Image (tube, rainbow, N blue to C red):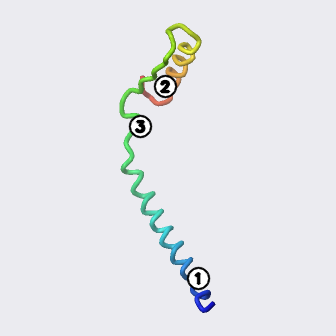
Amino acid sequence: MSNMPCAPQCLQRTLAAAMVLAAAASATCDGARAEYPERQITMIVCFPAGGGTDIAARLINTSLGEALGKP
């Protein structure tokens, strides 16, 4: 029971250290991120051309290319 008064202080120190580490990690992540995607994305459809799945994949692929800025 004599260790209980130290518990809030230890918790405060632990939380403060975690906040400092989280701030340092988030500050370094922005500079390391590359432009995504770096190259063209290839979509593979495992069904014959001209079918419903192929047409849907082509529509999704066109919209995805416009949204990401890649043809």
Amino acid identity at mark 3:
Tyr
Residue visible at 55% across and 77% down in the picture: 12
Snapshot quadrant of residue 43: top left
In the image, which is nearer the foreground, mark 2 or mark 1? Answer: 1
In the image, which is nearer the foreground, mark 1 or mark 3? Answer: 1
User: What kind of element bears circle 2?
Assistant: helix
- The answer to which of marks 1 and 3 sits earlier in the sequence is 1
| Badge number at residue 66 | 2
- Contact flag, marks 2 and 1 (Cβ < 8 Å): no
- Contact flag, marks 1 and 3 (Cβ < 8 Å): no
Amino acid identity at mark 2:
Glu
- The image shows residue 22, relative to residue 65, as above or below, that is below
Amino acid identity at mark 1:
Ala
Classify 10 Å Cα crowding around label 3: few (below 14), some (14-19), many (20 and above): few
**Where's residue 1, x and y in %?**
63, 90
Residue visible at 37% across and 42% down in the picture: 34
Left or right position of 34 against 5: left
Residue visible at 46% across and 63% down in the picture: 23
**Where's residue 35, x and y in %?**
39, 39
**Where's residue 39, x and y in %?**
36, 30
Please name the residue that numbered disc 3 is placed on: 36
Please name the residue that numbered disc 1 is placed on: 7
Q: Calculate the distance from the C-alpha at mark 2 to the C-alpha at mark 1.
A: 55 Å
**Where's residue 60, x and y in %?**
54, 22
Classify 10 Å Cα crowding around label 2: few (below 14), some (14-19), many (20 and above): few
Q: 52 or 36, which lies in front?
A: 52
